[in-house]
Image (tube, helix red, strand yellow):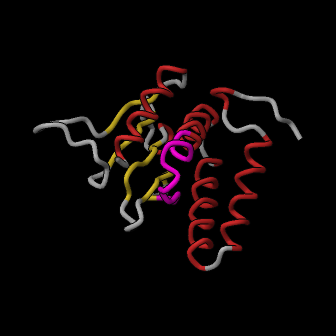
Amino acid sequence: MTTTQTGSDGFTEAERAAIKSRAAELRAEGKKGAKRADGLEQLLESTEKMAPEDRALAERVHVTVTEHAPQLEPKTWYGMPAYANADGKVVLFFKNAGKFKERYCTLGFEGAANLDDGDMWPTVFALTAWNDVVADQVAALVRRAVS
């Protein structure tokens, strides 16, 4: 099994194995855990279908959400990777560029996200690459969204 860090190239084989193990653990927890495991597997399947450059971004978003907002439930939403709160409301989603033949992927936040800032604020962000600056910005948005 490879454990090489791939950076912005997506999950390593070790990361993929860990995610699959986590899904199995969730299933073992019972009905609620099984639902979360099913959501995680659907999210991973939707990610696997993406073009390599879109998939790499989606995988980095997944790692960031899992690290900074582990309480969010992974799922798919209109076939896109998404993360919902305990009430089942989507907080954020990832739309890959290839899905709608767009120029760039987007990271979007729904009404359940705590991003309100005055009378107007952004809710969708274009993602064209993953680097340390983008990682920090996405992490800050995710943390704020669930605060």
How many numbered badges does the structure rendering display? 0
Point 54% across, 39% down: residue: 64
Q: Is residue 72 magenta?
A: yes
The furthest residue to the right: 1
Quadrant where the N terminus is found in the figure:
top right
Quarter of the view holding residue 106: top left
The percent position of residue 68, horizontal first and vertical second, equals: 50, 42
The furthest residue to the bottom: 31
Query: Which residues make up the magenta segment?
Result: 64-76
The percent position of residue 48, horizontal first and vertical second, equals: 65, 48
Quarter of the view holding residue 20: bottom right
Point 32% across, 38% down: residue: 124
Point 51% across, 28% down: residue: 135
The answer to whether 54 appears left or right of 143 in the picture is right
Point 41% across, 39% down: residue: 107
The percent position of residue 38, horizontal first and vertical second, equals: 61, 67
Examine the rendered structure and indicate whether residue 73 appears above or below residue 55.
Answer: below
Examine the rendered structure and indicate whether residue 38 appears above or below residue 141.
Answer: below
The percent position of residue 13, horizontal first and vertical second, equals: 79, 41
The answer to whether 145 appears left or right of 134 in the picture is left
The furthest residue to the front: 147
Closer to us: 30 or 89: 30
Closer to us: 129 or 91: 91
